[in-house]
Amino acid sequence: MTDADVLVVGGGPVGLAAAIEARRAGLDVVVLEPRSAPVDKACGEGLMPGTLAAVRRLGADPEGWPLAGISYRQDGRTADHRFVSGPGRGVRRTRLHAALHAAALDAGATVLARRADAVDQDAGGVTAGGLRARWLLACDGLHSRVRRDVGLDAPPRPGRGRRFGMRRHYCAAPWSDLVEVHWGPRVEAYVTPVAPDLVGVALLGPPGADFDAELATLPELATRLAGAAPDGPVRGAGPLRRVTTARTAGRVRLVGDASGYVDALTGEGLRVGLAQARAAVVHLDDARAYERAWTHLTRDYRLLTGGLVAAATSPLRRAVVPAAARLPRVYGAVVERLAR
C-alpha cells in the first residue's frame, strides 16, 4: 500500500519542477517541504534564456527584468556578450518560487508542510516523512539529508578550496540590461536587475568573507550602490561544491543540487536542475538510464564551471577578464553554450 507514486523531498524550484513533470506523466505526487511558500534562497536570480524557456514550459512565467546578456568587469576593463537566442530574465527568488508552487498545485501535486525523516526503502517502495511511495526524488539541496541517509555522499576532494555565496538586494533602479559580473581580488559579484527599483548582488568567494568589506574592493560597483538602501538581510549558502558517488540508490533519485554541485559561477544550476527533474521522471524505473542522462545533462556545466572555478581560485584569476576581452568570440561562444 502506498500513499503516492512519487514522493518529492524538497519543495524548492527543482522539487516543484519534478512534481509538475511527474503529474504530467500521470503519477500521483506528494511534495514534502517544511517551509511556507514562497521560499527564499541566496542565489544570483538571473534566468538564462534556456532556463526561462524551461520555466515557461512548466506553466510558470514570473515577473522580472529583461536580461540581454553577460558583462565581465574588472579594473575598468569589460567583456560584454549579448544573447543571440533572445533575452533571459532577472527574477526575485521568491517570485520564481511562488510561480512554480502555484503551477505545481494547478498540476494536481499535493504539497505538505512536513520534514522528511530518515529514508527507509525496500523492494516495493520508499518511506519518508510518514508516507510511503513507489519512488522518492531527493530535491533537498546542497545539504541533502536524503543523500546522506542513502549513502551517496562522497568525501571532499583534497586540495579543493571551499567557496560560499552571499546575496543582498538594494533599492536602486537597474543601470544595465546585462548581468554584470565584477571580478575583485577575492570575490565575484553578480549584479542582477530583478525589478524596476531593485537589483540583487550575489558574492561568491572564500569562507569568512564579509559582504560589505568585499563590496568595497569593487570600486565601480560600490560607487553604483552608494546611497542605495539594502532591501532585506544578507543571505548565505555553502559550501558550494558537493560530490556524490552516484545519483541513484534503490528507489531513490538525487535531483538538482542534491545530486552534486560545482559552483554558482556560471549561473547554470537551475537550468541543469530543471533538466534533471524531467530526466528523473522519464527514467524512474531505470537507474542506469537516469545516471547516463544525468552525466549527459551536467557535462558542460561540470567542465566549464570546474575550469572557470579552477582559474578563479588560482594565480590565473586576474587574467580571466582580460582574456575574455581579448577573445570575444571564445567568450561569446561560452556564454551562448551556457545560455541555451
Image: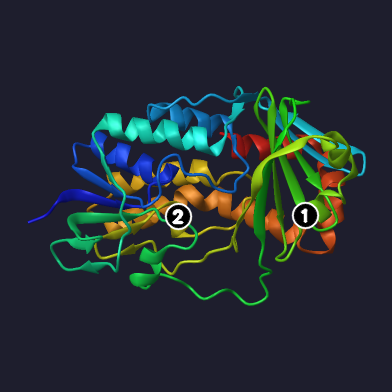
Q: Secondary structure at mark 1?
A: loop
Q: Position of residue 306 (x, y in %)?
A: 64, 57
The answer, for residue 326, to whether it is visible in the render is: no
Cβ atoms at labels 1 and 2 below 8 Å apart: no
Sequence-wise first label, 1 or 2: 1
Side of 60 relative to 265 (left or right): left
- Residue at 72% of width from left, 63% of height from top? 206
Side of 246 relative to 122 (left or right): right
Side of 336 relative to 323 (left or right): left
Answer few, some or many: residues within 10 Å of disc 2's Cα (few below 14, many 20 plus, some between 14 and 19): some
- Residue at 50% of width from left, 41% of height from top? 271
Q: Amino acid at mark 2?
A: Thr
Residue pointed to by mark 1: 187
Disc 1 versus disc 2: distance between alpha carbons?
Answer: 29 Å
- Residue at 37% of width from left, 73% of height from top? 151
Residue lying at the far left in this picture: please name it. Answer: 1
Question: Of the residues tagged 1 and 2, which is closer to the observer?
Answer: 1
Side of 105 relative to 277 (left or right): left
The answer, for residue 336, to whether it is visible in the render is: yes
Q: Position of residue 256 (x, y in %)?
A: 45, 51
**For this rendering, which residue is in front, 291 or 50?**
50
Answer few, some or many: residues within 10 Å of disc 1's Cα (few below 14, many 20 plus, some between 14 and 19): many
Q: Secondary structure at mark 2?
A: helix
Q: Is residue 9 above or below residue 239?
A: above
Q: Position of residue 144 (x, y in %)?
A: 43, 62
Q: Position of residue 275 (x, y in %)?
A: 43, 42
